[in-house]
Image (cartoon, rainbow, N blue to C red):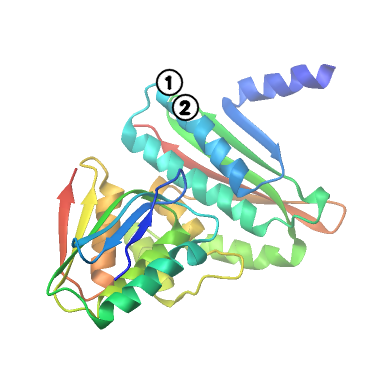
């Protein structure tokens, strides 16, 4: 399966979705001008992956910041991951970033997925 | 040239550290954010406060970008950042159609009537049920500003003589 690899910029996150190497990560800042357009390739990739996923998937969110329009799309990404067996979400937040910790908790309440919370 | 001094004096009196007036785009948003971040770095602001200020600035600036009518040159908006010993103030002003006033103030009144848990609930309700609008918003900006700042949103509409209203919004972030 093709690897989705997007370099991070000052307003978009770094994204690596690599089935072969088992790397699934969204990190950095997310405040794109058009969040729906930006996340569409990610949702499409997950859609294909869901047809033939690895036995277990560790999906990492290591976001420094995201805007509210991105939060809606992150929920869409999580919802797409919900249907994949063996999925675990690893939600990273900076140790003094309570807002990012709380954001992760809220997402975990909105979807049926195991979340592991980790600081960096 | 007197207005230059007056403007300068206003900025000093109101403790304004950044004022931008004009057209708002994503590129301008990034530039304003970068300037404000550099300013906070140079004054050694705490990272928790910096993050909150950044967060509120993004929502405020992107609100203006999304709702500005780029065809209309009379539609220029203003964005200000103030800082005193106790607070950062993120302030914006932009023209809106007079008939949008009622909807805006109803939404802001609802947000201001809620406590921390109420805002969390409202946020979750909106994010679950919302679709991204054609303007790219999720309808969560004001709720997020209220949550991140922990303060009420202060707003006022100034009626202009050309059938529009000027919407002024202030969100304060405590520095303690």
Q: CA distance from mark 1 to mark 2?
A: 6 Å
Which residue is pictured at 32% across the width and 61% down the height?
B117
Q: At numbered mark 1, what does the secondary structure look like: helix, strand or loop?
A: helix
The chain letter for the residue carrying disc 1 is: B
Q: Residues within 10 Å of mark 1 (few under 14, many from 20)?
A: few
Which residue is pictured at 50% across the width and 57% down the height?
B142
Residue B97, x across and y down, in percent:
75, 62
The chain letter for the residue carrying disc 2 is: B
Which quadrant: the N terminus of chain B?
Answer: top right
Residue B98, x across and y down, in percent:
76, 62
Residue A41, x across and y down, in percent:
43, 68
Q: Is residue A57 above or below residue A16?
A: below
Q: At numbered mark 2, what does the secondary structure look like: helix, strand or loop?
A: helix
Left-right relation of A2 to A116: right
Residue B42 is marked as 1
**In-front residue for pair B23/B91:** B23
Which residue is pictured at 43% across the width and 60% down the height?
A70
Residue B134, x across and y down, in percent:
61, 70
Q: Is residue B122 above or below residue A5?
A: below
Instruction: Tell me if residue B139 can be seen.
Output: no
Instruction: Tell me if residue B45 can be seen.
Output: yes
Q: Are marks 1 and 2 in contact (CB under 8 Å)?
A: yes
Q: Are marks 1 and 2 on the same chain?
A: yes
Q: Is residue A94 above or below residue A52?
A: above
Q: Residues within 10 Å of mark 2 (few under 14, many from 20)?
A: few
Q: Which residue is mark 2?
A: B38
Which residue is pictured at 83% across the width and 17% down the height?
B2
């Amino acid at each position: 399966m093709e690897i989705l690899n997007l370099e991070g910029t000052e307003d978009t996150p770094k994204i690596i979705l690599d089935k072969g190497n088992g790397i699934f990560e969204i990190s950095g800042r997310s405040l794109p001008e058009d969040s729906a357009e930006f996340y569409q390739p990610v949702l499409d990739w997950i859609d294909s992956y869901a047809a033939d996923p690895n036995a277990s998937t560790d999906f990492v969110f290591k976001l420094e910041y995201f805007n509210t329009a991105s939060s809606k799309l992150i929920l869409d990404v999580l919802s797409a991951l919900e249907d994949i067996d063996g999925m675990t979400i690893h939600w990273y937040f900076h140790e003094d970033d309570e807002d990012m910790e709380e954001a992760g908790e809220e997402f975990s309440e909105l979807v049926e997925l195991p979340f592991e919370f980790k600081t960096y | 040239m007197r207005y230059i001094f007056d403007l300068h004096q206003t900025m000093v009196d109101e403790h304004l550290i950044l004022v931008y007036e004009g057209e708002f785009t994503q590129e301008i948003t990034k530039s304003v954010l970068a300037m404000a971040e550099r300013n906070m770095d140079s004054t050694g602001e705490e990272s928790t406060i910096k993050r909150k200020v950044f967060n509120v600035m993004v929502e405020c600036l992107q609100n203006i970008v999304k709702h500005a009518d780029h065809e209309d040159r009379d539609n220029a908006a203003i964005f200000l950042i103030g800082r005193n010993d106790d607070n950062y103030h993120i302030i914006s002003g932009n023209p809106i159609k007079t008939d949008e006033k009622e909807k805006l103030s109803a939404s802001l009144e609802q947000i201001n009537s809620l406590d921390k848990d109420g805002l969390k609930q409202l946020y979750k309700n909106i994010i679950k049920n919302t679709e991204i609008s054609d303007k790219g918003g999720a309808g969560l900006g004001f709720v997020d500003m209220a949550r991140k700042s922990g303060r009420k949103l202060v707003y006022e509409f100034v009626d202009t003589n050309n059938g529009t209203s000027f919407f002024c919004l202030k969100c304060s972030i405590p520095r303690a």
